[in-house]
């Protein structure tokens, strides 16, 4: 793979994480496509345990949004770069780490008896999220390609999510 292709793919991947954070109101600090040797890019989350859950529905939705934001990067790579389905592509180590992390969240939820869907359900939802927000992801990816790193505020400025965006 050429550097240009790698950079485009990484930008799309990280842009999808960042757009998901904005849409789901998950705090994050910045997003970058600068390689540090171990990863090609990163979106730095600022996730804290939320206040005690008022409803089981609220807890499940929060978990689901975290999981979808983790899977959105890989979903965007498929949507923008591959046009394959989840099951047909040999994943990079980079992508596999996101999927492993999402699976760990699902496993942790089940250990405390939260009835949560399987990973493949969230993969499908993440793919739908990417399709619904493709223009926003593209705008952030284009800016990342030019500028390497964007703060959360800069991403919010680009994404301009209305109060009730589709989730
Ligand atoms: Zn990722």
Image (tube, rainbow, N blue to C red):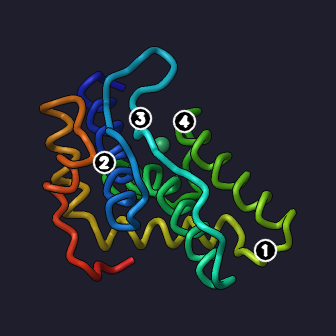
Residue receiving disc 3: 42
Q: Is residue 47 left or right of residue 161?
A: right
Residue receiving disc 4: 92
Q: Earlier in the sequence, mark 3 or mark 1?
A: 3
Packing grade of label 4 (10 A; few <14, some 14-19, many >=20) is: few
Q: Could you tell me how far apart the alpha carbons at marks 3 and 1 are, in whole angstroms?
A: 29 Å
Image location of residue 118, percent across then percent down = 71, 70
Instruction: Check if mark 3's residue and mark 4's residue have beta carbons within 8 Å.
Output: no
Q: Is residue 155 above or below residue 161?
A: above
Residue receiving disc 2: 15
Q: Nearer the viewer, mark 3 or mark 1?
A: 1
- Asked where in the image residue 51 lies, by quadrant, the reply is bottom right
Q: Residue at x 54, y 60 (%)?
A: 66
Q: Is residue 6 above or below residue 14?
A: above
- Report helix, strand or loop for mark 1: loop
- Report helix, strand or loop for mark 2: helix
- Quadrant (top left/top right/bottom left/bottom right) for the C terminus: bottom left
Image location of residue 129, percent across then percent down = 39, 70
Q: Is mark 3 within 8 Å of ligand 1?
A: yes
């Amino acid at each position: 793979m050429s550097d240009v292709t790698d950079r485009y793919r990484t930008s799309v991947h990280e842009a999808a994480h960042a757009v998901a954070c904005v849409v789901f109101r998950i705090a994050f600090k910045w997003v970058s496509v600068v390689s540090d040797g171990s990863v090609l890019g990163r979106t730095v989350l600022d996730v804290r345990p939320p206040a005690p859950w008022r409803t089981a529905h609220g807890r499940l939705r929060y978990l689901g949004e975290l999981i979808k934001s983790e899977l959105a990067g890989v979903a965007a790579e498929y949507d923008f770069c591959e046009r394959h389905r989840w099951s047909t592509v040999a994943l990079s180590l980079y992508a596999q780490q996101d999927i492993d992390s999402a699976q760990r969240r699902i496993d942790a939820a089940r250990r405390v008896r939260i009835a949560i869907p399987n990973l493949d359900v969230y993969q499908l939802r993440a793919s739908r999220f990417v399709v619904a927000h493709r223009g926003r992801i593209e705008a952030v990816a284009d800016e990342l390609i030019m500028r390497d790193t964007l703060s959360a505020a800069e991403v919010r400025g680009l994404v301009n999510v209305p109060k009730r965006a589709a989730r």
